[in-house]
Amino acid sequence: MSDSLPLADLHGRLHALRPTLLRLAQLQLRNAAWAEDAVSETLLAALEGASRFAGQSQLKTWVVGILKHKVLDQLRLRQREVAYDTDDEGEVIDDLVFAPDGHFRTPPQTWQSPSDMLQQRQFFEVLEACMEALPGQIGRVFLMREWLELDTDAICQELRLSSTNVWTMLHRARMRLRECLQLNWFGNPAK
């Protein structure tokens, strides 16, 4: 970390990130002790790997990336110990909005200007708040798919859900996120 933060500043910034990391880990692991282990391992890895942090991304982005791998390690380690609630209601997935892989058919356009970059950061803060408002199991399935990048079969196996149930939860998560963003970012109710 020759060009980046002094060690004391790094400790302070990592300490400030800890609550966010803990929320993300708890949402995925559903166990406070396991989440604490994942966050502790993440912070330790960040401190040990500080010299490799090139500053090409924000510190938060880099540390959340480390957490992603630590959460996956915890899931693998504890996979037989976790119990989950399921929701077996079914809804039709809107094929016009989503591709067969579950992602939006038309991706958002990238922003180029500095003012757009500021808006993008603010947008992601609103998006993060919207994601935190997702109901437990729906939010968990969404983050497993979009953040941990697990495929449907892995999510089904991990959570003991049918693929239909997973797709339904992903659909509900996306619709709730859309509604939340419509109200809190775009400033008009969803149609």
Image: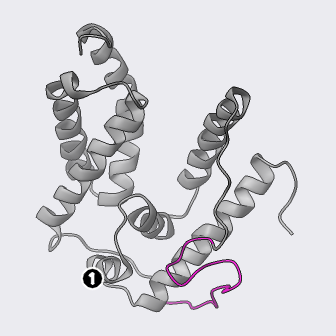
Q: Quadrant of the C terminus?
A: bottom right
Q: Is residue 22 above or below residue 151?
A: above
Answer with left or right where residue 129 lies relative to residue 68. right
> Is 97 colored magenta in this rendering?
yes
Residue 7 in picture, x, y percent from top left: 24, 11
Closer to us: 114 or 63:
114
Answer with left or right where residue 36 lies relative to residue 164. left
Q: Is residue 75 above or below residue 169?
A: above
Which residue is at a point 70% across and 31% down the rendered structure image? 113
Q: Which residue is mark 1?
A: 157
The single residue placed furthest to the front in the displayed view is 112
Most common secondary structure along the magenta stretch: loop
What colouring style does the render use? one colour
Residue 178 in picture, x, y percent from top left: 70, 62
Which residue is at a point 61% across and 48% down the rendered structure image? 127
Q: Which residues are magenta?
A: 87-104
Examine the image and state in which quarter residue 73 appears: bottom left
Residue 44 in picture, x, y percent from top left: 16, 31
Visible in this render: residue 105? yes
Q: Is residue 54 above or below residue 142?
A: above
Q: Is residue 151 above or below residue 178?
A: below
Residue type at mark 1: give it. Gln
Dot 1, crowdedness within 10 Å: few (<14), some or many (≥20)? few
Q: Quadrant of the N terminus?
A: top left
